[in-house]
């Protein structure tokens, strides 16, 4: 068996590692010109679903390098109002249950470092932009690239991201829709002078600033370098104009002055504006030699941090199934069908979770906002209520499924 993987991002490379471990021939085709040409702006939070997949797919030495280079979560998750009054802080012990198994933990990780580890012992074909593919009567698949070259295999996997060329041909009815929200991402370098004025709660862990407005601010510390800030607003709220930072600070004129200073102090080169999109639900399709992985099939907004973890989960499962087919223990179409059935279930559950988190953050009804703040305050003062109320918030989409139980 020979597998063509279109897309050399996190999911595609993890799949290639899984196939390599199963001694299945695979080739990765990536539109980037070189391994270091992609500049990813923000770090990732790897949850246990992602960590399990990395341990199962990476070479042992790369998995150990991963553990040696990642950070550790700490500082809890704080909910604050727009005057920086702390409503509730959820402890790490609730967010991230402890485990002796390193693959059942949570890790902040640099995207570039993770990609470097996923490239271990792989040799992708760079500068390959897919234009289309064809399936022959015998079932083989031919990929056509913009440079005039082609590649032939038994299976083609579209791991080519939210704008997937493979999906557009394979499932033209599978669309991405607006979530009704936009975001501005920014970075604040954690220099000694910044730490002097930065409010103490914003200098640790993760935080969400909530207000009676259709927008919120999320922050996450990535020690020792920077504070990630993500301002998320209902569509049409974000101001237009060239100076996004200043316009954003003006929008927050009634918020605490330190929050306005935070926005103005971020690195201008780090500012990026994004429209939040999500994959619309899809009905099952007939399985064949072409399939999809990661954002190519179940893209979601970053609220909840589930996108990369779900792609890693896809890679592990599809790698298992294709290895079984290559070994002759399962027919190929049955293997791909098994993957797609399971992937649709957990993948679109992750999409729904991401959308739920997004909508909760954008609540602006005065009564709902008052109720939410009251809930946070009560949770902040009553430990049992906090444990019960938040024990599943971070973990429900990361629990091991039956096929993930074995290493």
Image (tube, helix red, strand yellow):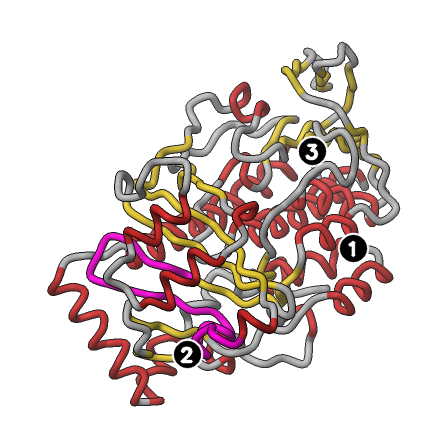
Q: Is residue 331 above or below residue 104?
A: above
Residue 34, x across and y down, in percent: 79, 34
Q: For the view shown, which residue lies furthest in the front direction?
A: 193
* Residues at marks 2 and 3, CA–CA distance in whole angstroms: 46 Å
- Circle 2 residue: 90
Residue 14, x across and y down, in percent: 72, 47
- Position of the N terminus by quadrant: top right
Q: Tag 3 or tag 2, which sits nearer the N-term?
A: 2
In the structure shown, which secondary structural element does the residue marked by tag 1 occupy?
A: loop
**In front: 245, or 227?**
245
- Circle 3 residue: 332
In the rendered structure, the answer to whether residue 222 lies left or right of residue 407 reads left
Q: Is residue 49 above or below residue 245?
A: below
Residue 35, x across and y down, in percent: 78, 39
Front position among marks 2 and 3: 2
* Residues at marks 3 and 1, CA–CA distance in whole angstroms: 24 Å
**Magenta stretch in the rendered image:** 196-218
Residue at x 40%, y 43% (from the top left corner): 244
């Amino acid at each position: 068996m020979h597998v063509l993987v279109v897309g050399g991002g996190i999911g595609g490379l993890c799949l290639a590692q899984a196939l390599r471990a199963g001694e299945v021939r695979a080739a990765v085709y990536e539109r980037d010109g070189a391994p270091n040409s992609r500049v990813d702006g923000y770090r990732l939070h790897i949850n246990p679903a992602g960590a399990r997949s990395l341990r199962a797919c990476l070479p042992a030495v790369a998995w150990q390098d991963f553990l040696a280079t990642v950070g550790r979560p700490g500082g809890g998750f704080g909910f604050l109002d727009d005057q920086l009054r702390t409503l509730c802080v959820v402890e790490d012990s609730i967010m991230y249950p402890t485990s002796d198994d390193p693959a059942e933990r949570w890790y902040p990780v640099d995207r570039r470092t993770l990609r470097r580890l996923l490239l271990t012992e792989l040799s992708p074909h760079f500068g390959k932009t897919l234009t289309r593919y064809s399936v022959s009567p015998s079932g083989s698949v031919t990929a056509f690239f913009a440079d005039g070259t082609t590649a032939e295999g038994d299976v083609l996997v579209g791991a080519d991201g939210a704008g997937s060329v493979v999906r557009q041909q394979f499932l033209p009815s599978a669309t991405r829709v607006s979530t009704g929200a936009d975001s501005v991402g920014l970075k604040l370098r954690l220099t000694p002078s910044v730490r002097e004025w930065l409010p103490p709660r914003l200098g640790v862990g993760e935080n969400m600033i909530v207000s009676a407005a259709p927008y919120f601010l999320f922050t996450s510390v990535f020690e020792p370098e920077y504070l990630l800030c993500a301002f998320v607003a209902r569509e049409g709220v974000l101001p237009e104009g060239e100076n996004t930072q200043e316009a954003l600070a003006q929008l927050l004129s009634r918020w605490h002055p330190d929050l306005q200073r935070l926005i103005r102090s971020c690195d201008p080169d780090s500012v990026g504006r994004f429209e939040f999109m999500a994959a619309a639900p899809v009905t099952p399709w007939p399985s064949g030699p072409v399939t999809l992985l990661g954002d190519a099939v179940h893209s979601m907004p970053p609220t909840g941090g589930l996108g990369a973890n779900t792609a890693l989960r896809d890679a592990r499962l599809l790698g298992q199934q294709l290895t079984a087919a290559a070994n002759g223990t399962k027919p190929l179409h049955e293997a791909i069908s098994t993957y797609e059935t399971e992937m649709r279930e957990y993948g679109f559950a992750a999409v729904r979770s991401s959308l739920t988190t997004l909508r909760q953050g954008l609540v602006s009804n005065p009564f709902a906002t008052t109720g939410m703040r009251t809930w946070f305050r009560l949770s902040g003062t009553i430990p049992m209520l906090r444990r019960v109320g938040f024990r599943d918030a971070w973990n429900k989409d990361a629990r091991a499924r039956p096929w993930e139980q074995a290493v």
